[in-house]
Amino acid sequence: MPLTTPTHAFVRAPSTAYARCLREQPCAIDVGVATQQHDGYVAALRDAGIDVQWLPPLVDAPDATFVEDTAVVVDGAALVTHPGALARREETPSVAAVLASSMAITHMHGPATLDGGDVMRCGDTLVVGHSQRTNEGGIAALTEFAARFGLRTHVVQLAAGLHLKSACTMLDAATLLYWPGAFTIDALAPLRLDCIAVSEPAGANVLPFADRVLMSDAAPRTAELVAKRGGAPRLLALSQIHAGDGALTCLSLRVPPAGAWVA
């Protein structure tokens, strides 16, 4: 089963409250610039041939642009999550309502918690980070959901960082980029991946498509590495997304074509 380009992706524009988003290191955020950068991200998805669909705005939900955390989409179905941060649980009903028009929906309930940013697909495996936002109950709910589609889960304990995909993402079907220190790389040994450590935190979060790799312009050295390996990096300005502890993958829910999977 190949890794390929999504058929479509769901996104949500940064709200006017985005400057109040949850983050580990408080810093000034320019909502206007964040919106421009989000527009650039959407344009990059469309340029890759992806049908971009907009979720309704949530004016008073500062983190709502990080839609990846609200659901896990596989094989024409979605698990709507129960986010680890209480303030983010208001985001999921609107996501579920939109997804329900095109796929089967399963709802997760507390005390289980799961953020979609802790779930990374690798072939027939969903790698899930046990993190400050995802607990054992959430992992169990994901495992039950995945089993319906012949998928298994593989748990990685995070020692640092917000989400698993803040620390690692797939570059292609057999290659992983990771930022050292967030977890023990030996935890991924059973997956038999070519694991490449990167020297820039933003370089650990990439979006690989069939013919290009979307990357943050905060990771130029990683982009050079990707190019040397035959990839085609496309750098995007994401400074105000990073300021909110976000990254490329956080900004969309991506839907794979039948018989394939997406990062």
Image (cartoon, grey):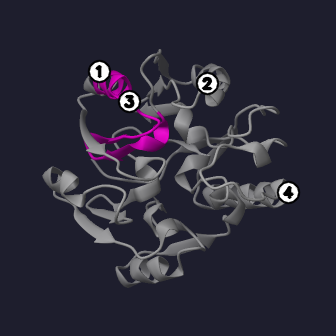
Q: CA distance from mark 1 to mark 3?
A: 15 Å
What residue is pinned by disc 4?
32
Q: Amino acid at mark 4?
A: Gly
Give the mark toward the camera: 1 or 3: 3
Closer to the camera in the image, 232 or 207 = 207
Q: Amino acid at mark 2?
A: Arg
Residue 64's disc number: none
What residue is pinned by disc 1?
144
What residue is pinned by disc 2?
89
Q: CA distance from mark 2 to mark 1?
A: 21 Å
- Look at 42% across and 33% down and name the residue there: 134
Q: CA distance from mark 2 to mark 4?
A: 25 Å
Which one is earlier in the sequence, the residue at label 2 or at label 4?
4
Segment colored magenta: 115-144
Closer to the camera in the image, 24 or 100 = 24
Q: Amino acid at mark 3?
A: Asn
Q: Amino acid at mark 1?
A: Glu
How many residues crowd around disc 4 within 10 Å: few (fewer than 14), some, or many (20 or more)? some
Give the mark toward the camera: 2 or 1: 2
